[in-house]
Amino acid sequence: MSPAPDGGLWNGRKVAEWMSQITGKEVTRMRGWEDLKQMEYSLRVPRPEPQEISIEEQQEWKKADAPTRRFPPLKSVRQANFV
């Protein structure tokens, strides 16, 4: 989908105005919104840029986060059936 005429993001009002210009008939904001949803339009926001950190800081973060990443051992299927 191309950018909105004003350079911003598309919304129901802008779609309705655009459709009104194309068809020559009045189109409601709700109809514009319904068309956006039908096209499965979703707001696309760029991901934030990664911050540069040193190797030492990365290692410290991994050490600090390690205990929270461990999961308890899973029971086997046989053990689960007899408990």
Image (tube, rainbow, N blue to C red):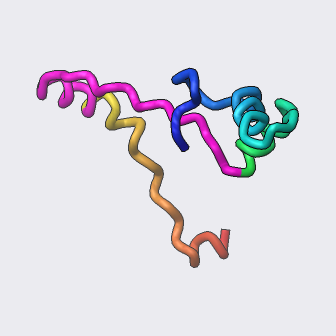
| Count of residue discs | 0
- Residue 23 in percent (x, y) is at 78, 42
Main SS, magenta region, reads loop
Q: Nearer the viewer, residue 66 or 26?
A: 26
Is residue 54 found left or right of 69 in the rendered image? left
Examine the structure image and report whether residue 50 is included in the region drawn in magenta.
yes
Examine the structure image and report whether residue 11 is included in the region drawn in magenta.
no
Q: Residue at x 18, y 30 (%)?
A: 59
- Residue 73 in percent (x, y) is at 45, 57
Instruction: Locate residue 50: give its quadrant.
Output: top left
Q: Residue at x 73, y 34 (%)?
A: 21
Q: Is residue 33 above or below residue 49?
A: below
- Residue 45 in percent (x, y) is at 49, 31
Q: Nearer the viewer, residue 6 or 73?
A: 6
Which quadrant holds the C terminus?
A: bottom right
Q: Residue at x 75, y 31 (%)?
A: 12
Instruction: Locate residue 19: give its quadrant.
Output: top right
Q: Is residue 13 above or below residue 71?
A: above
Q: Which residues are magenta?
A: 39-62
Which quadrant holds the N terminus?
A: top right
Q: Is residue 81 above or below residue 74?
A: below
Looking at this rendering, what residue extends furthest in the front direction?
A: 24
Looking at this rendering, what residue extends furthest in the left direction?
A: 55
Q: Residue at x 47, y 51 (%)?
A: 72
Q: Nearer the viewer, residue 20 or 71?
A: 20
- Residue 65 in percent (x, y) is at 34, 32
